[in-house]
Image (spheres, rainbow, N blue to C red):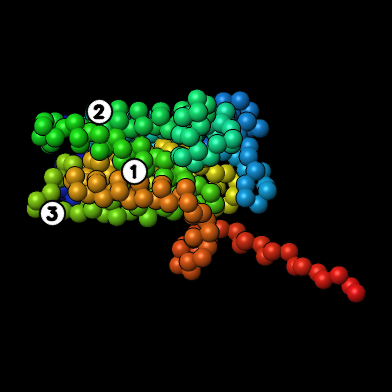
Amino acid sequence: MRRTPAGARPGSAIGALAAAVAGAAAGAVAARVAYAAFRRRPPIGDEKTWTRTNHRGEPITLLEGPALVAGAGAAAALAPGLPARLRAAALLAGLGGGALGAYDDVLGTTASKGFKGHLTALARGEVTSGAIKIIGIGATGLAAAVLARDPAARPTGAGAMDTLLDGAVIAGSANLANLFDLRPGRAIKVAFLAGTPLLAVSLATRPTGVPARNATAAVLTAIPLGAAAALLPEDLGERAMLGDAGANALGALLGLAATVRLGRTGRLAVLGTVAALTAASEKVSFTKVIAANPVLNRIDMLGRRPVPPPPAVVSPTP
């Protein structure tokens, strides 16, 4: 029998909260352990393989990404109370998205950029690392949705459409999270802005709700948020960044949690938002939009090193 805290019933608000806290703590501890281990011995290649230049022109490591993938994966494998199908779905979404992102981090090129750029290159017969990642994340997202589907909770006739919808939410969320990983801490802050309401809704008790689904959704949400929170100081300190590996895994896991908790209307709303933001990223710079908005800019700069002022222009002496 699964143990629950004293006074907590399986599926109760207290039980769901306890399970979510345990999942977040497991993700955080595992992510920190993985980061320390990868700093000593990277999972592939050497330290130089994972070193890039950030927006300041300074060297930074991408090993934060594999650490998040490993931490969230370990927590998903060990967290109590998750049904086997959801445990498998979380491992596939997180590890699959992370592995494909790591492939693009290590072997990718910048000849083509953006969703449209990679698909345009693919239409010309050029298979870019980004195109492989897009197709792969779409496939793993759909496979995770198939694994996560509960036939008893959703009518069989609507199963195929629901599964396609869920796969699109998981894959789209993975891609969108990566689009925000352009400044220190930004992708993790966006994950918390999206994940915190989902966690709150999952922990809320409603007479018409499904307690077991609420509890599992809370755990699935808490695991990646805990791993991300543990690595946030490295990100904000500009010592490390998520890269494609970490951002893709973070987005995919939150997308999976959303498909578990939300009804069809909610999932359609999430997919519409993800699609709109992804399309907007092809036309506008998120960085410029954020910088131009005082509220968004304040959130974006919270905890970060100050941006140095532009160099003064010295007029030539007549």
Of residues 169 and 62, the one drawn nearer to the viewer in this rendering? 169
Residue 292 located left or right of residue 311: left
Residue 235 located left or right of residue 312: left
Does the CB distance between marks 2 and 1 fall below 8 Å? Answer: no
Q: How many marks?
A: 3
Disc 1 residue type (three-letter): Leu
The mark that comes first in sequence, 2 or 3, is 2
- Check disc 1 and report the residue beneath it: 254
Of residues 246 and 134, the one drawn nearer to the viewer in this rendering? 134
Q: Nearer the viewer, mark 3 or mark 1?
A: 1
Disc 2 residue crowd, few under 14, some 14–19, many 20+, Cα 10 Å: some
Residue 29, horizontal then vertical, whole percent: 43, 40
Query: Which residue occupies 86% across, 70% down?
Result: 316
Disc 3 residue type (three-letter): Arg
Asked whether residue 268 is in view, the answer is yes
Query: Which residue occupies 16% across, 41% down?
Result: 212
Screen quadrant of the C terminus: bottom right
Disc 1 residue crowd, few under 14, some 14–19, many 20+, Cα 10 Å: many
Occupied quadrant, residue 145: top left
Residue 201, horizontal then vertical, whole percent: 23, 53
* Label 2: element kind: helix
- Check disc 3 and report the residue beneath it: 206
Does the CB distance between marks 3 and 1 fall below 8 Å? Answer: no
Residue 57, horizontal then vertical, whole percent: 68, 48
Occupied quadrant, residue 4: top left
* Label 1: element kind: helix
Disc 2 residue type (three-letter): Leu
Residue 122 located left or right of residue 207: right
